[in-house]
Amino acid sequence: MARDRLESVLTIRKRAVDGLRRDLAVCAASESAVEARIAALDDAVRRDRAAHDTLDDAHRFQEMFAERRLAGEAERAAAMRALTEARARSAEVRAELVAARVAAEAVGAVIAERAAARAAGQARRAQFELEEAARSGKPPIASAV
């Protein structure tokens, strides 16, 4: 009966590990998306600088470039905050995943220890029956063979 409960607990623990793996995959996708947005913003800044340097009358567009740069910097700062939050969430999920794996392994170890103890007990009983049969001269019981 206790074994059935432990098997159920192990199943629950394994499902928790699987759920956390899925959560970690979502976190990784979120981080990648934010990193891609930051790279796109950095590329836009480089393109604007290159375009500014190629214009003959760049001084006419100076204000426009400055406003676009300020907007881009604000957007990049927001993206960096989002990346920091996404990385923090990933770290939390990783820690939860490690704890869930350890819990599942602990339950598995208890199940294995109990199975080994049962097998050892059965082996001791079988050995005892064989020794008793040898001492008494009677044939061993069928369960001991």
Image (spheres, helix red, strand yellow):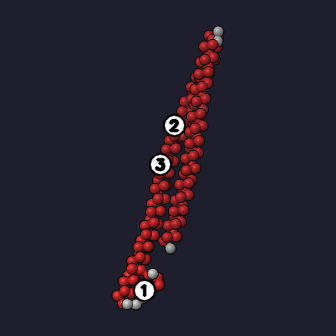
Q: Residue furthest top?
A: 56
Q: Of circles 2 and 1, which is in front?
A: 1
What residue lies at 47% left-to-right and 59% top-to-bottom? Answer: 105
Which amino acid type is shown beneath numbered disc 2?
Thr
Q: Which residue is mark 2?
A: 84
Determine the residue positioned at 44% across, 86% down.
141
Residue 47 x %, y %: 62, 21
| Residue 21 appears in the figure | yes
Tell whether label 2 touches label 3 (CB within 8 Å): no
- 30 to the left or right of 142: right
N-terminal of the pair, mark 3 or mark 2, is 2
Give the CA separation, mark 1 to mark 3. 55 Å
Which three-letter amino acid code belongs to the residue tagged 1? Answer: Pro
Which circle marks residue 140 in the picture?
Answer: 1
Query: On the image, which quarter does residue 41 sit in?
Result: top right
Mark 3 sits on what residue?
A: 95
Residue density around tag 1, few if under 14, some if 14–19, many if 20 or more, within 10 Å:
some
- Secondary element at tag 1: loop
**Residue 12 x %, y %:** 54, 61
- On the image, which quarter does residue 66 sit in? top right
Left or right of 128, for residue 100:
right
Q: Residue at x 64, y 12 (%)?
A: 55
Check whether the beta carbons of the residues at disc 1 and disc 3 lie within 8 A of each other: no
